[in-house]
Image: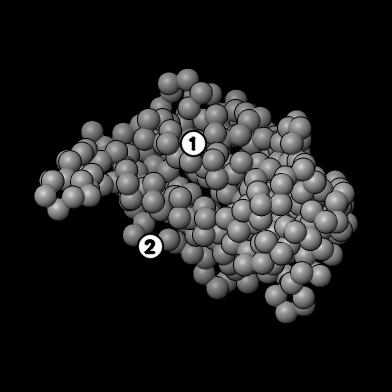
Amino acid sequence: MATYHEPVLCREALSFLLTDKDGVYVDGTLGSGGHAESICEQLSPRGRLIGFDADGDAIAEAGKRLQRFGERVTIVEANFRLLRERLAGAKIAGLLLDLGVSSHQLDDGTRGFSFRSDDRLDMRMDRRAQFSAWDVVNTYPEEQLAKILWEYGEERLSRRIARSVVRARPVDTTGSLASIVERCVGGRFLTKSLARVFQALRIEVNSELGSLREVLAAVPDVLQPGGRCVVISYHSLEDRIVKDFFRAEAAERIPSGNALVPDTPRVPRLTVLTKKPVVAGKEEYERNPRARSAKLRAAARPAL
């Protein structure tokens, strides 16, 4: 049976996130409910949790895990990019985002996320979506495919791989794609290149970076004064977006870009709580390899 991952940096995330035990919190990446369960356990009977996830399998698992909390938990089957819309003006005490792909999605052969199997190319986190990795691999022009592999996977052989993929079309399975990458890369760096290529395709299929930017843009508006946002990311593209957003929203002035023109003062909308990203200790990443690449950043809306 496919498994769901152990929540990463759970203790650290909750130490930043929880400031009001009677408050409303949002887990924007509900998954199997590991972080959500820990949040609910620390809230008072008046506290509430709203969980977002686009993956129906994850929601079913989380629903069972969180059933004991009854009406204190609301589960929304939607991407977290819809946070502002679904909250409809309500303010929350905190938002948690644990980005990336789950162990269940990697292990489930019907999902087509992993290069270690030979399944239909898919990678849709929301199975209701029509667009899949098969469409990217088999319909994108060579130049566009190479651009995705370079920008989202930081793969140095992106052009060579894209050229080989286009020549081999149709490419129907994860195993076929992995074989193409292997012929381009060779053995020494194969695993890293496969990880980069599959990461790039997954990001493109699910519009992950665009969704992250959208939900971050909503953060200063949906947090109540003193409310907090905690984000756990697993690769440099996500971490850079989070770091730059928090830094920009915490700035007290907007640079003019001209030595002769003064900067424009502004009222910061967030306060950065983590000067450097929080990372897992040796004990955690030895127990849970997924934690090895995790970086946690947190910010707060200034209190009134």
Percent x, y of residue 300: 34, 43
The answer to which quarter of the image holds residue 115 is bottom right
Percent x, y of residue 179: 84, 64
Helix, strand or loop for disc 2: loop
Residue 38 makes an appearance in the image: no
Q: Nearer the viewer, residue 157 or 235?
A: 157
Q: Residues within 10 Å of mark 1 (few under 14, many from 20)?
A: some
Helix, strand or loop for disc 1: helix
User: Going from the N terminus, do you reach mark 2 or mark 1 first?
Assistant: 1
Disc 2 marks a residue whose amino acid type is: Lys
Residue at 63% from the left image edge and 64% from the top image edge: 155
Is 122 displayed left or right of 78 in the figure? right
Residue at 45% from the left image edge and 55% from the top image edge: 240
Is 272 displayed left or right of 78 in the figure? left
Disc 1 marks a residue whose amino acid type is: Glu
Decide: is 159 above or below 80.
Answer: below
Extreme top residue here? Answer: 88
Q: Nearer the viewer, residue 163 or 274?
A: 163
Decide: is 111 above or below 63.
Answer: below
Residue at 70% from the left image edge and 75% from the top image edge: 189
Percent x, y of residue 43: 48, 38
Q: Residues within 10 Å of mark 2 (few under 14, many from 20)?
A: few
Dot label at residue 276: 2
Instruction: Identify the image quadrant of the C terminus.
Output: top left
Dot label at residue 214: 1
Q: Nearer the viewer, residue 164 or 30?
A: 164
